[in-house]
Amino acid sequence: MRRRGTWFQNKDFWRTVHPILFRQRRWEMATEDVNNIISLLKFKRGAKILDLCCGVGRHSLEFARRGYLVTGVDLTAMYLREARRKAKHEGLAIDFFQQDMRRFRRTNTFDAVINLNTSFGYFKTQRDDVRVAEHMYAALKKGGFFVIDLMGKEVLARIFRPRDWYELEGTIVMEERTPSNDWSTLENRWIILKGNRRKEFTFKIRFYSAAELCALLKQAGFRKSAVYGDLAGAPYDSKATRLIVVARK
Ligand SMILES: C[S@@+](CC[C@H](N)C(=O)[O-])C[C@H]1O[C@@H](n2cnc3c(N)ncnc32)[C@H](O)[C@@H]1O
Protein backbone atom coordinates (compact mmCIF):
# COMPACT_ATOMS: atom_id res chain seq x y z
CA MET A 1 0.00 0.00 0.00
CA ARG A 2 1.25 3.49 -0.83
CA ARG A 3 0.69 5.79 2.06
CA ARG A 4 0.89 9.53 2.36
CA GLY A 5 0.93 10.88 5.91
CA THR A 6 0.05 8.65 8.82
CA TRP A 7 -2.32 5.68 8.67
CA PHE A 8 -5.22 7.51 10.31
CA GLN A 9 -5.03 10.23 7.61
CA ASN A 10 -5.52 7.65 4.90
CA LYS A 11 -9.00 8.19 3.44
CA ASP A 12 -8.89 4.86 1.62
CA PHE A 13 -8.44 3.07 4.94
CA TRP A 14 -11.55 4.65 6.50
CA ARG A 15 -13.55 4.18 3.27
CA THR A 16 -12.64 0.49 3.16
CA VAL A 17 -13.31 -0.25 6.84
CA HIS A 18 -16.61 1.71 6.88
CA PRO A 19 -18.81 -1.40 6.37
CA ILE A 20 -16.88 -3.16 9.14
CA LEU A 21 -16.97 -0.33 11.69
CA PHE A 22 -20.49 0.89 11.02
CA ARG A 23 -22.55 -2.18 10.20
CA GLN A 24 -26.16 -2.32 11.41
CA ARG A 25 -25.35 -4.14 14.68
CA ARG A 26 -22.90 -1.36 15.58
CA TRP A 27 -25.68 1.24 15.24
CA GLU A 28 -27.86 -0.81 17.60
CA MET A 29 -24.95 -1.05 20.04
CA ALA A 30 -24.62 2.75 20.01
CA THR A 31 -28.13 3.02 21.48
CA GLU A 32 -27.09 0.69 24.33
CA ASP A 33 -23.84 2.66 24.78
CA VAL A 34 -25.76 5.91 25.12
CA ASN A 35 -28.18 4.38 27.67
CA ASN A 36 -25.18 3.17 29.66
CA ILE A 37 -23.27 6.46 29.50
CA ILE A 38 -26.34 8.40 30.65
CA SER A 39 -26.75 6.17 33.69
CA LEU A 40 -23.02 5.94 34.41
CA LEU A 41 -22.64 9.74 34.46
CA LYS A 42 -26.17 10.46 35.77
CA PHE A 43 -26.24 12.76 32.81
CA LYS A 44 -29.11 15.28 32.50
CA ARG A 45 -30.92 16.23 29.29
CA GLY A 46 -29.70 19.51 27.87
CA ALA A 47 -26.10 18.88 28.96
CA LYS A 48 -23.34 19.69 26.45
CA ILE A 49 -21.40 16.78 25.08
CA LEU A 50 -18.41 16.48 22.77
CA ASP A 51 -18.12 13.26 20.76
CA LEU A 52 -14.39 13.22 20.04
CA CYS A 53 -13.69 11.04 16.98
CA CYS A 54 -17.42 10.81 16.28
CA GLY A 55 -17.08 8.85 13.03
CA VAL A 56 -20.41 8.74 11.20
CA GLY A 57 -22.17 10.01 14.32
CA ARG A 58 -23.52 6.81 15.86
CA HIS A 59 -23.43 8.27 19.37
CA SER A 60 -23.77 11.96 18.44
CA LEU A 61 -27.12 11.33 16.74
CA GLU A 62 -28.45 9.23 19.60
CA PHE A 63 -27.50 11.83 22.23
CA ALA A 64 -29.08 14.59 20.14
CA ARG A 65 -32.31 12.57 19.77
CA ARG A 66 -32.51 12.54 23.56
CA GLY A 67 -32.15 16.28 23.97
CA TYR A 68 -28.42 16.66 24.60
CA LEU A 69 -26.46 19.46 22.91
CA VAL A 70 -23.91 17.68 20.79
CA THR A 71 -20.66 18.62 19.08
CA GLY A 72 -18.90 15.99 16.98
CA VAL A 73 -15.27 16.12 15.87
CA ASP A 74 -13.61 13.80 13.40
CA LEU A 75 -10.80 13.91 10.88
CA THR A 76 -12.48 11.94 8.11
CA ALA A 77 -14.54 14.17 5.82
CA MET A 78 -16.61 11.36 4.29
CA TYR A 79 -17.71 10.20 7.77
CA LEU A 80 -18.74 13.73 8.69
CA ARG A 81 -20.70 14.10 5.46
CA GLU A 82 -22.68 11.01 6.39
CA ALA A 83 -23.18 12.24 9.98
CA ARG A 84 -24.38 15.67 8.79
CA ARG A 85 -26.72 14.10 6.23
CA LYS A 86 -28.29 11.86 8.87
CA ALA A 87 -28.63 14.72 11.37
CA LYS A 88 -30.30 16.90 8.74
CA HIS A 89 -32.66 14.09 7.74
CA GLU A 90 -33.79 13.76 11.37
CA GLY A 91 -33.90 17.51 11.97
CA LEU A 92 -31.19 17.31 14.65
CA ALA A 93 -28.95 20.31 15.30
CA ILE A 94 -25.44 18.96 15.85
CA ASP A 95 -22.22 20.89 15.31
CA PHE A 96 -19.80 18.73 13.39
CA PHE A 97 -16.19 19.84 12.90
CA GLN A 98 -13.57 18.28 10.70
CA GLN A 99 -10.42 18.48 12.75
CA ASP A 100 -7.53 16.48 14.08
CA MET A 101 -8.31 15.69 17.71
CA ARG A 102 -4.94 17.22 18.68
CA ARG A 103 -6.05 20.58 17.32
CA PHE A 104 -9.61 20.85 18.64
CA ARG A 105 -9.58 23.31 21.52
CA ARG A 106 -12.30 24.87 23.64
CA THR A 107 -12.42 26.29 27.16
CA ASN A 108 -14.95 25.36 29.91
CA THR A 109 -17.54 24.38 27.33
CA PHE A 110 -18.66 20.75 27.78
CA ASP A 111 -20.25 18.72 30.56
CA ALA A 112 -18.81 15.54 29.06
CA VAL A 113 -16.38 14.43 26.38
CA ILE A 114 -16.74 10.91 25.01
CA ASN A 115 -14.09 9.09 23.01
CA LEU A 116 -15.45 5.69 22.08
CA ASN A 117 -14.49 2.48 20.37
CA THR A 118 -10.69 2.64 20.59
CA SER A 119 -10.23 6.12 19.14
CA PHE A 120 -7.23 6.98 21.34
CA GLY A 121 -3.54 6.06 21.05
CA TYR A 122 -3.20 6.72 17.30
CA PHE A 123 -0.14 8.97 17.40
CA LYS A 124 3.54 8.23 17.00
CA THR A 125 4.44 9.81 20.29
CA GLN A 126 2.64 9.44 23.57
CA ARG A 127 3.09 13.17 24.08
CA ASP A 128 0.30 13.67 21.53
CA ASP A 129 -2.07 11.47 23.56
CA VAL A 130 -1.27 13.60 26.61
CA ARG A 131 -1.88 16.75 24.55
CA VAL A 132 -5.34 15.50 23.54
CA ALA A 133 -6.16 14.77 27.19
CA GLU A 134 -4.92 18.23 28.23
CA HIS A 135 -7.12 19.87 25.60
CA MET A 136 -10.12 17.84 26.75
CA TYR A 137 -9.42 18.88 30.34
CA ALA A 138 -9.52 22.52 29.21
CA ALA A 139 -12.65 21.93 27.12
CA LEU A 140 -14.61 20.53 30.09
CA LYS A 141 -16.48 22.55 32.66
CA LYS A 142 -15.44 21.98 36.26
CA GLY A 143 -16.95 18.65 37.38
CA GLY A 144 -17.22 17.47 33.75
CA PHE A 145 -16.36 13.94 32.64
CA PHE A 146 -13.98 12.53 30.04
CA VAL A 147 -15.09 9.02 29.04
CA ILE A 148 -12.58 6.88 27.15
CA ASP A 149 -13.49 3.45 25.81
CA LEU A 150 -10.57 1.29 24.65
CA MET A 151 -9.47 -2.26 24.25
CA GLY A 152 -7.43 -2.31 27.48
CA LYS A 153 -4.01 -3.92 27.53
CA GLU A 154 -5.08 -6.42 30.19
CA VAL A 155 -8.11 -7.47 28.10
CA LEU A 156 -6.07 -7.70 24.93
CA ALA A 157 -3.40 -9.84 26.60
CA ARG A 158 -6.08 -12.19 27.97
CA ILE A 159 -7.90 -12.76 24.68
CA PHE A 160 -4.92 -12.23 22.39
CA ARG A 161 -5.02 -13.98 19.03
CA PRO A 162 -2.22 -13.21 16.58
CA ARG A 163 -4.51 -13.87 13.61
CA ASP A 164 -8.23 -13.84 12.91
CA TRP A 165 -10.42 -13.87 9.89
CA TYR A 166 -14.14 -13.28 9.46
CA GLU A 167 -16.70 -12.57 6.78
CA LEU A 168 -19.16 -9.68 6.87
CA GLU A 169 -21.76 -9.33 4.15
CA GLY A 170 -19.50 -10.68 1.44
CA THR A 171 -16.32 -8.95 2.65
CA ILE A 172 -13.56 -11.13 4.07
CA VAL A 173 -11.39 -9.49 6.70
CA MET A 174 -8.08 -11.02 7.80
CA GLU A 175 -6.38 -9.44 10.78
CA GLU A 176 -2.83 -10.01 11.96
CA ARG A 177 -1.68 -8.50 15.27
CA THR A 178 1.83 -8.15 16.62
CA PRO A 179 2.59 -6.56 19.99
CA SER A 180 5.59 -4.23 19.73
CA ASN A 181 7.69 -1.97 21.97
CA ASP A 182 7.25 -4.29 24.96
CA TRP A 183 3.44 -4.37 24.55
CA SER A 184 3.17 -0.57 24.38
CA THR A 185 1.89 -0.73 20.84
CA LEU A 186 0.08 -3.18 18.60
CA GLU A 187 0.99 -3.49 14.94
CA ASN A 188 -2.04 -4.44 12.89
CA ARG A 189 -2.15 -5.77 9.36
CA TRP A 190 -5.58 -6.03 7.77
CA ILE A 191 -6.23 -7.71 4.45
CA ILE A 192 -9.69 -7.01 3.10
CA LEU A 193 -11.10 -9.05 0.23
CA LYS A 194 -14.26 -8.16 -1.65
CA GLY A 195 -15.01 -9.95 -4.92
CA ASN A 196 -11.69 -9.95 -6.73
CA ARG A 197 -10.46 -6.79 -4.99
CA ARG A 198 -7.78 -7.01 -2.31
CA LYS A 199 -6.66 -4.23 -0.01
CA GLU A 200 -4.02 -4.30 2.64
CA PHE A 201 -3.45 -1.81 5.45
CA THR A 202 -1.03 -1.65 8.32
CA PHE A 203 -1.50 0.52 11.36
CA LYS A 204 -0.11 0.85 14.83
CA ILE A 205 -2.05 1.76 17.97
CA ARG A 206 -0.67 2.50 21.44
CA PHE A 207 -2.32 0.34 24.07
CA TYR A 208 -2.95 1.32 27.65
CA SER A 209 -3.43 -0.62 30.82
CA ALA A 210 -5.92 0.85 33.29
CA ALA A 211 -3.10 2.19 35.48
CA GLU A 212 -1.24 3.70 32.50
CA LEU A 213 -4.33 5.49 31.20
CA CYS A 214 -5.24 6.83 34.66
CA ALA A 215 -1.65 8.10 35.08
CA LEU A 216 -1.82 9.86 31.69
CA LEU A 217 -5.12 11.51 32.62
CA LYS A 218 -3.67 12.64 35.94
CA GLN A 219 -0.73 14.14 34.09
CA ALA A 220 -3.25 16.05 31.93
CA GLY A 221 -4.87 17.52 35.06
CA PHE A 222 -7.80 15.22 35.85
CA ARG A 223 -8.13 14.86 39.59
CA LYS A 224 -9.95 11.50 39.74
CA SER A 225 -10.55 8.55 37.42
CA ALA A 226 -12.91 5.61 37.79
CA VAL A 227 -12.23 2.40 35.84
CA TYR A 228 -14.85 -0.04 34.50
CA GLY A 229 -14.90 -3.19 32.39
CA ASP A 230 -17.72 -2.02 30.12
CA LEU A 231 -19.98 1.00 29.68
CA ALA A 232 -22.63 -0.59 31.93
CA GLY A 233 -20.19 -0.13 34.81
CA ALA A 234 -18.97 -3.73 35.30
CA PRO A 235 -15.71 -4.04 37.28
CA TYR A 236 -12.44 -4.02 35.38
CA ASP A 237 -11.56 -7.58 36.34
CA SER A 238 -10.65 -10.83 34.60
CA LYS A 239 -14.02 -10.84 32.79
CA ALA A 240 -13.82 -7.26 31.49
CA THR A 241 -14.45 -6.83 27.77
CA ARG A 242 -13.30 -3.21 27.45
CA LEU A 243 -11.36 -0.63 29.40
CA ILE A 244 -13.57 2.32 30.31
CA VAL A 245 -12.02 5.23 32.15
CA VAL A 246 -14.21 8.06 33.41
CA ALA A 247 -12.01 10.96 34.45
CA ARG A 248 -13.43 13.96 36.30
CA LYS A 249 -12.26 17.55 36.02
C1 LIG B 1 -12.76 3.38 15.38
S1 LIG B 1 -13.49 4.81 14.69
C2 LIG B 1 -14.67 5.19 15.96
C3 LIG B 1 -15.75 6.14 15.53
C4 LIG B 1 -16.85 6.43 16.58
N1 LIG B 1 -16.32 6.88 17.85
C5 LIG B 1 -17.74 5.25 16.78
O1 LIG B 1 -17.65 4.59 17.84
O2 LIG B 1 -18.54 4.97 15.89
C6 LIG B 1 -12.21 6.01 14.91
C7 LIG B 1 -12.54 7.38 14.36
O3 LIG B 1 -11.46 8.26 14.66
C8 LIG B 1 -11.31 9.18 13.58
N2 LIG B 1 -9.95 9.71 13.66
C9 LIG B 1 -8.81 9.06 13.38
N3 LIG B 1 -7.75 9.84 13.62
C10 LIG B 1 -8.24 11.03 14.06
C11 LIG B 1 -7.64 12.24 14.48
N4 LIG B 1 -6.32 12.39 14.49
N5 LIG B 1 -8.44 13.25 14.87
C12 LIG B 1 -9.78 13.11 14.85
N6 LIG B 1 -10.41 11.98 14.46
C13 LIG B 1 -9.64 10.94 14.09
C14 LIG B 1 -11.61 8.33 12.36
O4 LIG B 1 -11.96 9.13 11.26
C15 LIG B 1 -12.75 7.46 12.87
O5 LIG B 1 -13.98 8.06 12.62
Image (cartoon, grey):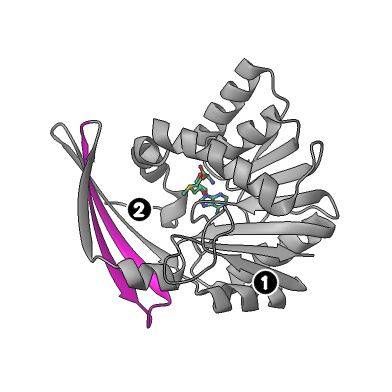
Q: Residue furthest bottom?
A: 182
Counting residues from the start of the chain, the first of labels 2 and 1 encountered is: 2
Residues 44 and 178: in front is: 44
The secondary structure type at the circle numbered 1 is: helix
Q: Quadrant of residue 51?
A: top right
Q: In the image, is 57 to the left or to the right of 165? A: right
Query: What residue does disc 1 label?
Result: 217
Three-letter amino acid code at the position of disc 1: Leu
Which picture quadrant has residue 45?
top right
Pick the quarter of the image with the C terminus: bottom right
Residue for point 29% across, 68% down: 160
Q: What range of the chain is rendered magenta?
A: 170-192
- The reply, left or right, for residue 4 in relation to residue 177 is right
Q: Where is residue 141 in the image (x, y as percent from the top left)?
A: 85, 56
Residue 75: within the magenta? Answer: no
Of discs 2 and 1, which sits in the foreground? Answer: 1
- Residue on which the image places disc 2: 3
Q: What residue type is labelled 2?
A: Arg
Residue at left offset 41%, top offset 31%: 24
Using a 10 Å C-alpha cutoff, classify the residue at mark 2 as few (fewer than 14 neighbours), some (14 to 19) or many (20 or more): few
Residue 120 percent across, percent down from the top left: 54, 60
Taking the image as shown, residue 27 lies to the left or right of residue 194, namely right
